Amino acid sequence: MEFRLLGPVGAWHAGRRLGPATPQHRTVLAMLLLEPGRPVPVARLQTALWGSEPPESSRNAVQGHISRLRRLLAPFPEAALTTSARGYCLTAGRDRVDLHRFRDLVRDAGGEPDPARAADLLRAALTLWQGPPLADVAGRWLPDVVLPGLEEERLAALERRVALDLRQGRHQEVAAELTPLVGENPLRERLVSLLMTALLRGDHRTEALAVFRGVRRRFAEELGIEPGEELQRLHQAILAGREEASARGAASAVKGPISPSTPQPAVPRHLPPDTEPFTARQDELAALDRLTAPGPDQAPAPCVVVTGTGGVGKTTLAVHWAHRARDRFPDGQLYVNLQGYGPTHAARSPAEAVRLFLDALQVPPELIPATLDAQAGLYRSLLAGRRMLILLDNALDADQVRPLLPSAPGCLALITSRAELTGLVAAEGARTLSLRLFSPAESRELLARRLGKDKVGAEPQAVDDIVSRCAGLPLALSIVAARAHTRPAFPLRALITGLEEADGPEAGDEPGNLDVFDGGDTGTNLRTVFSWSYRALTPDAARLFRLKGLLPAPEISTSAAASLAGVTVREARRLLTELTRANLAAEPSPGRYGWHDLLRAYAEELTLLHDSDGERREALHRLLDHYLHSAHLGDGLLEMLHRVPLTLPGPRPGVVVARITDRAQSLAWFGREHRTLLAAIRHAARAGFDAHAWQLACACWGFLSQEGRSDDQVAMYRTALEAALRLADPAAQAHVRVGLAQALIRLGQDGTSGAHLSQALALFRTLDDPVGQGVCLTYLSVLEDRQGRYAEGLALCEEALRLHRSAGDRAGEGRVLNNVGWFHARLGAYGEALRRCEEALLIHRELDDEPGESATLDSMGYIHHLLGQYEEAIAYYLRSLSWRGGNRALGARTLQRLGEAQVAAGRVAEGRRTLGRALDLVAELAPGDAGALRARIDGLGG
């Protein structure tokens, strides 16, 4: 079996065409045969068949075409069509595909010292062309993208064969052959030069000059320029009567490299110098080894893209790996800086880059075609049969890179870019390696290698501060190291003075100062390096990037970004995707976007420079509204046993509230956002949004309390209290003091807690708020319980019960009734205690109040335990845990009581296990109580 691409596409056997029958099948076959033995991604087949917008059914259609091709090839073991995760691969010998036989013959001719033999090889290669290549395929991709390169290969081979024929005196045959070809290609100067030489050799000087005049006219009419230097010299030589010299020059000028394997005077070694010392990135170097290694099908990756934010070390890594791997590419390494991101506003064009490569491959200027497609075709032809590494550094986008990608199986394109170049992944099957920021350990290693272990070891705290403030960005660390080198007598602590001004949002209202990260030129000025990525953004994405400098935390959700920018979620997602592709943001988890502190500082500089005070304040207002109303929505789904209801004004226009519909979603949302919420409260207080500061703290109460995050709760509420005092708002102060007191009770700070509760109670009395008063009295009763003053605690709860009933607050009434029952039990009145708890249980079930019901069931378990009814107590505790098991703080208490009941019932081993579960929670939530519980467990034995 043989395959043909240089004419009608198909599979042939014994001189008969077997198929494929349809243009679509022929397109798929041609795509597989262009690179036999190398997987072709499905996306590239889709592009070849339907262009940039394939229909939804295209993947299924491709699978159908592959199935039909398999049936066609099944009887022929010499051609195997296989499937892998990387695409479809047709394995067949090069001698069975006319295109690759042609290339092999051209290569052999280039190494043949005998001109007559070389001409015969080229003639044999050209006879393989049976008409226009790819003549009967479907789609425009093959004719528009691949065909020009193939045609260039044919003409280059033809020109070399003609030159060899001229050297053997076959000028009449050459003139007859070239006359119609020049008519078809009047602007191809090499053909024109050879035709003029052939006419001269045949004593047709006038005709040769006429050819030049005609070509000169076409150049003027179509291009507005004169013919090239070679034709001009030949024309002048003819006019001066130097026919023989000019003919010899024209005939011998084609002796330079034309074919892919023509021996070169030197192997190109164009890699930039390696970086020494090279720090860390061992995992990434190993990943590049894996990504570039041949797979099970023995086909290496066509190209690998190293991507990452500005200053993360993409070029350093790529160059270092290229030096390590250069023995794998003995035919040379090409390098070009594509200037996609840099001080100039213009990236290097693909045409300029191709010309650089052709020059590196020592192609004489007169043999370089005029069009980019033809130049790219010649470049790929020269790589055929070679093993070369092409390092395309600092690429702007996929379109800039595509003409530079090699097609030869032994070659690899290694690309670096700040953009993700997803188009190359989809259409060309590229593999990607995303560079992360340095870990603290890697950052210290870089400093130690640059400055010496002794200097770094002498100032560990200073080094820790430098590592923290450089945010793991290698360029920032290198700039600081360079500053230390230029001032060797200075202690590292002296560098911290400048870096402290570059600290994150906790430093104050002014943006982080990036001036310290200036290495003296554009490539080592952090602000300038970031600006190259920022300049490439669309205006809307640039605005969102600037506004994210207002965000007091390193991460943002899609709905928060939509609120910040005042756009829809769909538009925000599009803009965030653009920032991610430009590596000005990262997506560490689906729908969440982050950036390091130095990028945030740069964004804050930009928003202060480009956005008005009013625009910034309105954007921050929307963002804080998003967090406030989302937290309030989630808080209402969590429920707290004793708290004062919070009423909010409506959100601003353009605010998107998070979608939270149940308790599980609420816990998940708070779990993701609680660090951001803490930072948002601080930032709101600093920025003059005091109402947001105290309200946001109150909206987080339920989550923080249920999760036992008392330290965070205290930090939030102290900031909130300062804001409430600035507002001179009694209601705000009362709400905040209750929440602060509840957290302080958890932390055992009863005295401070009691003072806040007393002040809150007085404020709620002034406000005539019975529910607020009842909540204060309830928490004051907890303090009495701790002091063993059960009668005083009962009196406070009875007064709280009266207040909740007077306000018609049934939920509050039920919960206080449970506390009344608890105190009766503490006083030994077990019957009254159970009666009050049963009253509470009826109200909780009436209101479908699961948290209240679980608290009452816990109390009833405690009462039955005191009555010596241990199995009944165990049953109540287990029922309570059906809800409390999802609340770590309350669950820890009930688990501890359950364990004690099990021990009392004689189920000691089971009780010990339950107490162990409680200890795990207590050790995390209330470490001060863990010692006593641990001693209790130890006292139970093994």
Image (cartoon, rainbow, N blue to C red):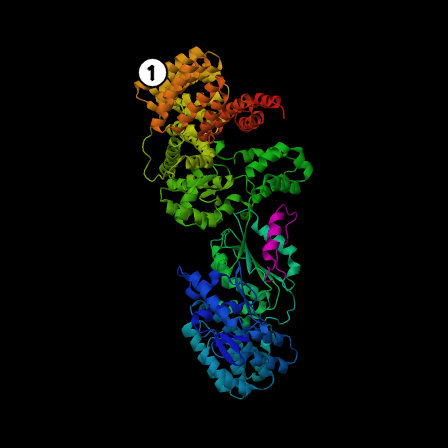
* Quarter containing the C terminus: top right
Taking the image as shown, residue 387 lies to the left or right of residue 44, namely: right
For residue 283: magenta? yes
Viewer-side residue, 745 vs 141: 745
Residue 804 percent location from the top left of the image: 33, 19
Q: Amino acid at mark 1?
A: Arg
Q: Is residue 106 visible?
A: yes
Q: Quadrant of residue 615?
A: top left
Q: Which SS type dominates the magenta stretch?
A: loop
SS label for mark 1:
helix
Question: Up-down: is 382 above or below 43?
Answer: below
Residue 186 percent location from the top left of the image: 46, 77
Q: Which residue is at the far right?
A: 454
Tag 1: Cα neighbours inside 10 Å, few (<14), some, or many (≥20)? some
Question: Up-down: is 605 above or below 523?
Answer: above
What residue is shown with label 1? 802
For residue 774: magenta? no
Question: Up-down: is 87 above or below 490?
Answer: below
Q: Residue at x 43, y 76 (%)?
A: 218
Viewer-side residue, 16 vs 826: 826
Which residues lie in the magenta part?
A: 269-298
* Quarter containing the N terminus: bottom right
Residue 735 percent location from the top left of the image: 38, 23
Taking the image as shown, residue 477 lies to the left or right of residue 887, namely: right
Count the marks: 1
Residue 814 percent location from the top left of the image: 36, 22
Q: Is residue 685 visible?
A: no
Q: Quadrant of residue 699?
A: top left
Question: Up-down: is 147 above or below 736?
Answer: below
